Amino acid sequence: MGSKNKTGQSAALLSLMTSTGNALAAWELNFQAPATQAAQTVIDLHNLMMIIIVVIFIGVFAAMFYSVFRHRKSQGHAAAQFHDNTLVEIAWTVVPLLILVAMAWPATKAVLNMRDTSQADITIKATGYQWKWGYDYLKGEGEGIRFMSLMSTPAEQIRGSAAKGGNYLLEVDRHVVVPVGKKVRVLTTATDVIHSWWVPALAVKQDAIPGYVRDTWFKAEKEGIYRGQCAELCGKDHAFMPIVVEVVSAEKYSQWVGEQKQQMAAAADEGAKTYSLAELMNRGEKVYAANCVACHQANGKGLPPAFPALDGSKIAKGPKAEHIAIVLHGKPNTAMAAYGGQLGDGDIAAVVTYERNAWGNKTGDVVQPAEIKAARK
Amino acid sequence: MEATHAHGAGHAHGDGHSHHPKGVMRWITTTNHKDIGTMYLWFSFAMFMVGGAMALIIRAELFQPGLQYVEPEFFNQMITLHGLIMVFGAIMPAFVGFANWMIPMMIGAPDMAFARMNNWSFWLLPPAGILLTASMFVPGGAAGTGWTLYPPLSIQMGIGMDMAIFAVHILGMSSIMGSINIVTTILNLRAPGMPLMRMPMFCWTWLITGYLLIAVMPVLAGAVTMILTDRHFGTSFFSAAGGGDPVLFQHIFWFFGHPEVYIIALPAFGVVSHVIPAFARKPIFGYTSMVYAIASIALISFIVWAHHMYVVGMPVAGQLYFMYATILIAVPTGVKVFNWVATMWRGSMTFETPMLFALGFLFLFTIGGFTGLVLSNTAIDVQLQDTYYVVAHFHYVMVAGALFSAFAAVYYWLPKWTGHMYDETLGQWHFWLSIVSFNIAFFPQHFLGLAGMPRRIPDYALQFVDFNQVSTIGAFGFGLSQLLFLYVVLKAIRGGEKAPAKPWEGATGLEWTVPSPAPYHTFEEPPVLSGAKGHE
């Protein structure tokens, strides 16, 4: 069956990952290879606890199984009738307590360290959306960079009509790039429901809570690509909003920052331009595929009642202003997010145009970026 | 579970109740604790089958990466309903069923204290079960939030969410009535000469569980009502936009949710504390310390809730406090495990099916306890929160813990209920099939969690394929093994070797002084207790 095929893929993945020094192997029995001191600390703590637990476990169940095999009626063992021993009972209350205190001490130190987010070199805000992550570089080198990061695994791979790639479900269109050896503070928040930003190799997991900002930090010791996933159930595509952090050298990071700034400058002055219907439709289809298709579906039929159809909808065929407003500001208490903060004027203009002309919605309306700019005010 | 025979034995009563209704009306109007106990147990088994079928849908989808059988929305509905149905529909009613059947007989009472309320607390359950199950078929489907119902996701759901909320309200009412009944029965209807510190351990665990239920079920009802008003009446308890806080719900939910774990576990402890002494032919070791351990576990369970929330971003002082408090629970839990082992020590043991399940419980529950200790460590939990490690952990506690204990209870008391011995060979097959397939299903999930597989996902990355396939095979094995259980129980109801009043050589307690099957009415006159034999 398919399972052989899968095993083959896993093996391919194994060789791929080990060759890049980032071991994500099949039959893995333990934590992922650590890339931060904090992740190493977690592994050390876990090892310590496992040793203590296994020793106690063997002690208790050695006694039980000895009893099970020796103190049997079939062996002619007569039952003793003791049922109390104050000294023994005090001992097995106090001794475990002391062992637990000994375990709590290193844990306390680790927690205090994990939560110290002060003196960060770079601060990045990660915003959870249904179902993607947005990143804003708030402080430090790269300040001002902002982008959305969407899973890039194609639907054909998920549906089984194409072979699954090596980083199946763990790949995105734009990586979070950070420099090696720098303390990166991550602020987490969300716009719709609770998400959780988790990268195992960095030992960072922090819930992203709508309306509130939380923080965590990491300092990657090794260059490489580290992959994680949303860890809090956030709706239907919870499995499909991965997180990819790319740790690079300081020079490479500076170079990346330069490229990003250029691209953003180019995007900023598109508000003044006007486009033809064909141009907007073309671009709008791509924006739609990246942002809207998960709920409203490629055919515009949606998945009612949670995710309404756009094909023939009152909003997509009604006044432009209402359509623009709902895309910009979302719809409270539904999964419809506010895209005003996520997409630029050009993208919103394109996607609104697309929705008003695709499928059976042949309104002929053209929405220009300038109209979006005006609607934002 | 063996209704017809309990009824068949009804001719033993000579008390003017012979005019009670026949047929279905008998079950609808009954106030007899044995009838009601039987109904609780059958309801529980039916919900166990429904919840189990959902688990198999989940595991079938997870057999391979990619989406094969169900859409993600439906997958989320399955995990939600599986959790709610198993916790509220299967495990809790099962132990209330045991309490109904056994507590009056253990303490020498003629029936439960509030017999008519007892009827009502059972008959609330089927509508709740129907609401939960039927919510799959309404527009938008059932709640897809996980059994924890976290907002704002639960605010986005359709009418299925409202049905789940209503079901939780009804289940809460049923639990509160049931627990008031049990507490009152234990406190007021004990036979003369049975002081609290000599009553059977199962009664102690239920006395304390009853108080836990009365304390926390209203909290859950409040939390889901707040979701309801946020959904429909414009309040903003859990919405930051209106001045609320989504995390508030988690605090309230887990203030209920952690004691809930012990609501399920404590009666299981009680059953095991009867079965192990019976088959070791030796009194339970450390009766007094067992009682103190149960009480301490119950008290501490109220002050540890936020260990389910280490990554929501609470102050570091909060994280440390909840870690220390959680670690503390290991002490009384350890005392219980040590006491059970000491009870076996130098006993004269035999290994009939109830004993096998009790030993399976002890072994696997201890593993679940240890992984709980690992999770209590905040630093480690940051890596493990919301992963399959947690799924493995609570299935070791809930399935190998509570469910195995429930199986032990059924096999232990089945002769008393039906008047027949069950098929010992098949019972032992049921045990071995269950324990082997259970471990195949759930042990690999520890590794999946450690390696970084999040829970509640219908599709996963390729490095998780192998252990998921093993787990799915185990889950199907475990599910199918339970059909054997049904067969063994039905076979015992229909016939078999006649059971004596006390089928287990080492069993002690008043329930073994009445004939098997137990007559429809027992202890209409309180029994005369001689000295210190209450708990032994």
Image (cartoon, rainbow, N blue to C red):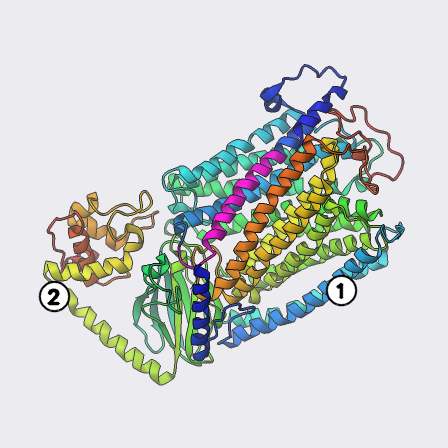
Tell me where the magenta segment starts and ends, as one range. Answer: B41-67
Task: Say whether residue B43 is magenta.
Answer: yes
Callout 1: SS:
helix
Query: Left or right of B39: which side holds A22?
Result: left
Q: Nearer the viewer, mark 2 or mark 1?
A: 1
Task: Say whether residue A352 is magenta.
Answer: no
Mark 2 nearby-residue class (10 Å; few <14, some 14–19, many ≥20) = few
* Identity, as a three-letter code, of the amino acid under mark 1: Gly
Instruction: Say whether disc 2 or disc 1 marks the residue closer to the N-terminus.
Output: 1
> How many numbered marks does the figure carry?
2
User: Which of the 4 image quarters holds residue A10?
Assistant: bottom left
Magenta stretch mostly in which secondary structure?
helix
Seen from the viewer's position, the closer of residues A278 and B425 is B425
Q: Chain of mark 1?
A: A
Seen from the viewer's position, the closer of residues B117 and B65 is B65
* Quarter of the figure that contains the N terminus of chain B: top right
Residue A299 visible somewhere in the drawing: yes
Query: Left or right of A377: which side holds A213?
Result: right
Q: Mark 1 = which residue?
A: A59
Residue under the point 79% across and 26% down: B523
Residue under the point 55% across and 58% down: B390
Mark 1 nearby-residue class (10 Å; few <14, some 14–19, many ≥20) = few
* Identity, as a three-letter code, of the amino acid under mark 2: Lys
x and y, in percent, of residue A367 in the image: 14, 56
In the depicted structure, whether residue B11 falls above or below residue A377: above
Q: Mark 2 = which residue?
A: A273
Residue B266 visible somewhere in the drawing: no
Q: Chain of mark 2?
A: A
Query: Left or right of B455: which side holds A365?
Result: left
x and y, in percent, of residue A261 in the image: 26, 76
Q: Residue furthest bottom?
A: A251
